[in-house]
Structure formats: C-alpha cells, structure tokens
Amino acid sequence: MFKKREGAKVRDKSGNLPITKNALAKKGSYMNKPSEKNCLTSNTALICSVQNTFSINFIFCFIKYVECKTTFAKHFFLFLFLLSSKVFSQFHGAVGSANTNAIHKDSSIFVAWAKTCVVNRGWQNIANTGLGYTNVGIDSNAIGKAGENPVVSLGDGGFAILTFDKPIINGAGYDFAVFENSFSNYFLELAFVEVSSDGVNYFRFPATSNTQHLTQIGPYDELGEPEKINNLAGKYRVFYGTPFDLEEMKNNNGLNVNAITHIKIIDVVGCIHAPYASIDVNSAPINDPYPTDFGNGGFDLDAVGVIHQLDVGINEFTANKSLNVFPNPANKIVLIQNPEKKLMNIQLINSAGNSVYTWLGDTNQFQLNVEEFPSGMYYILMFDHQNYYTQKLSIIH
C-alpha cells in the first residue's frame, strides 16, 4: 500500500526502528515500512477509519495500542481508542447502568396504555418467504399494560398500529414508551417508531445505530449495545420501556405533536446486507439478530405506555379555537364547520373524556349522526396539522 521513501531508516535485527530525534522528526517515514511489527502499516489498521458514518472499531484500536512498539504509534491508536469510545457511548445505557433512561412498567409516570392494535405481519425470514409469516400472538396482546398479556411477534418488516383513548401530547420530557420482551440487556430486537396526528400521515423518529455492521449478529447472539442505539424501540429488556420525546418531532409539517392519535411500530430487519437491511438516519445498516426464522421472529411487541396525554374531561377542556356546530342541542344530524381551515380529524368525546367516535377526512364541512349516542354533554374535538379546535355539544333524545 505504501511505497518506501528514499532515505528511510533501516530496521535493526529485531525489526524495530532506532528511536532518535531525527526519526521522531521524520515519523512519517514509519508509515512507509511494510512490516507486521509496525501497526501503522498493517492493512487491518484501516479498520480504524470508519465502520459506519460515525463509528470506529475501538476494540481493534485498543489491541493495536498494546501491541505497538513506537511512541508515536501508541499515541495514534490511543487517540483512536478514546475517540471511538466517546463516539460509541453517546446514548443511554442498558437497564441498571448509571445513565439508562429505561422506564419500568410499574412506574407511576404512566397514565394510560394503548386501546387498540392492528398488526400487519412480516415474514419469518424475508430472504426465504416460503417459511411464511410470523404467527405468535394476536393483535390485542399489545393492548393494556406491559407484562399483563403475551406479546405479538411482528416478523421481518412487519408493523403494528396502536391508538389510544386520548391523544398523546408533547409534555415535559418523554411522552410515551414502547415495551419489548427481550430476556437480557444485550439480546435486542429493534423497531422503528412513527407517530401520526391524523392516522394517515406518519413521521419516523430519527433512529441511530452505531453498532458494528461488519459481522452479522446471529439469531441467538447477545451482542446488542444499548449505549450505541437511539430512538429505536426494543433497546431495553422485558418490563422496561424505551421512551420517546415528541419534542424531537415538532418541526415536521403535517404533524401535531400535541394531538398524537396513532403510533406505528415497524420491525427492523436486522440483516446487514442489501437488499434487506434496515437503514438508520446516518444511512448505516442496523445490525440485530438475524435470521429469526420462526413463528415468533422479529420484534415482539408487548405494550405502549402513555406518559403525557390530552386532558379532555368535560370540566377541563380549554379550546384553542372555535368550531361552528349546529343544531346544538341535537338529536339526529349535527353540521360541523370550520371557517378557517379544513376539517382533518374529528373526535366525539364523552363526559368521561373518552373518544366514542373518530372521523378522518379533508373537508370544510361534515355531518355527524348522533342518534346512536346516549343523551348527555359531549365535546367535538378537531385536529388539523397545527391546532386543535373544540366545541361543546349537547345530545338530547
């Protein structure tokens, strides 16, 4: 790889360069000696460049630091080791570590859990579709508190869409958490997380995986590294949720972070090779156990816990804007109009604060049939991409 430079120092019988002031002044000449003892000229030293967008093979660098004979080489690899350690450990660590942000299922921080779940199964092995789809668990297993039901397995690239009694909002700190059923801190089956405020347009949390992707993690390997993973569900073991903060999503046009109605969990295909690899925000493949070609393969969804939700009790609701709703009181058809913007997502909220009807569309006017709802006081809640609008509605039969 390197050409010998004229006038370069000659090694002694032991293969080492003489350490002199001139030699140190010409340390570049060390790199021109193709020798096994000179770690700077080893082909494998190039691994210390970049494995993915930001990561370096720090184990290799540390070993080479120990093996190196020259002061300059030691300093070089020590620098790479310290740099790579910093790069690799930039996120929250495993359950039990000092900097973990894992949240236990019994934490009082949770105020609600998913109400509905619809699963679109993925393959047991995306590279061998003859094995069929995963088949462990049912959709409703992901409803309710973590640990109270069996899981539902998504399979390669499969996904689940969950809804909630009340919209999730962007509060202080984390706003919801996703639970998987890993049996250890380091067997990590991962998933992307997307959110929507209309059930149609979904926006993905920017996911990062700085885990090495030179060697495929096998189906039973406990080689996951939570401290190198961010914004991917499944980075924590069973009964501990991976939290997500809607503040990171507030600049997405078309998303109202104070009215999240749907969460989508999408299995990461852990294969590190095209065309099946799942890619993180830095265009690096995400390495997790693969293949998991059995009925419970892929991400095993346990639950989604809510930390901040919209308080829509009749006595608590504060309107940002007003809707035109008539007749009011009503017993059959209610006409709903928004003079400022189109109606995007309409919900009818009962006196207990629960959503009893949802409509998705794109119009300035909507007719709601209220004949099937009991008499009482309700709120009509409408979301657009920026605000929510409310109006009291009295139903009398």
Image (tube, helix red, strand yellow):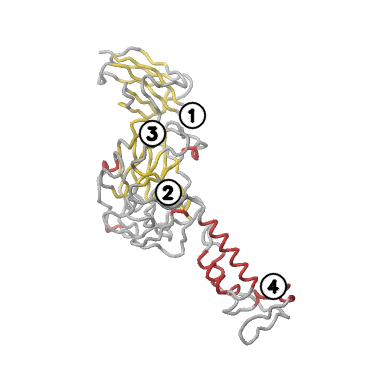
Give the label, 4 or 3, closer to the camera.
4
Q: Which amino acid does label 4 sit on?
A: Lys
366 to the left or right of 282: left
Give the label, 1 or 2, closer to the camera.
2
Q: Give the residue number, with chain letter if any, for mark 4.
A: 27
Q: Earlier in the sequence, mark 1 or mark 2?
A: 2
Find residue 386 and name its label. 1
Q: Give the residue number, with chain letter if any, for mark 2.
A: 232
**Residues marked 1 and 2 touching at CB (< 8 Å):** no
**C-alpha span from label 4 to label 3:** 62 Å
Task: Name the residue nearer the viewer: 275 or 239.
Answer: 239
Q: How many marks?
A: 4
Q: Which of marks 1 and 4 is nearer the N terminus?
A: 4
Task: Say which element carries label 1.
Answer: loop
Q: Locate the C terminus by quadrant.
A: top left
Query: Which corner quadrant of the image does residue 262 belong to?
Result: top left
**Horizontal and vertical percent for residue 362?**
41, 28
Q: What residue type is labelled 2?
A: Leu
Q: Which residue is drawn at the image coordinates 43% and 65% (left, top)?
A: 215
**Residues marked 3 and 1 touching at CB (< 8 Å):** no
Q: Which of marks 4 and 3 is nearer the N terminus?
A: 4
Task: Say which element carries label 3.
Answer: strand
**C-alpha span from label 3 to label 1:** 14 Å
**Horizontal and vertical percent for residue 253?**
50, 35
**Residues marked 4 and 3 touching at CB (< 8 Å):** no
Task: Say which element carries label 2.
Answer: loop
> 10 Å neighbourhood of mark 1: few (<14), some, or many (≥20)?
few
Q: Which amino acid does label 1 sit on?
A: Gln
Find residue 261 and name its label. 3
Q: Which residue is drawn at the image coordinates 66% and 80% (left, top)?
A: 17
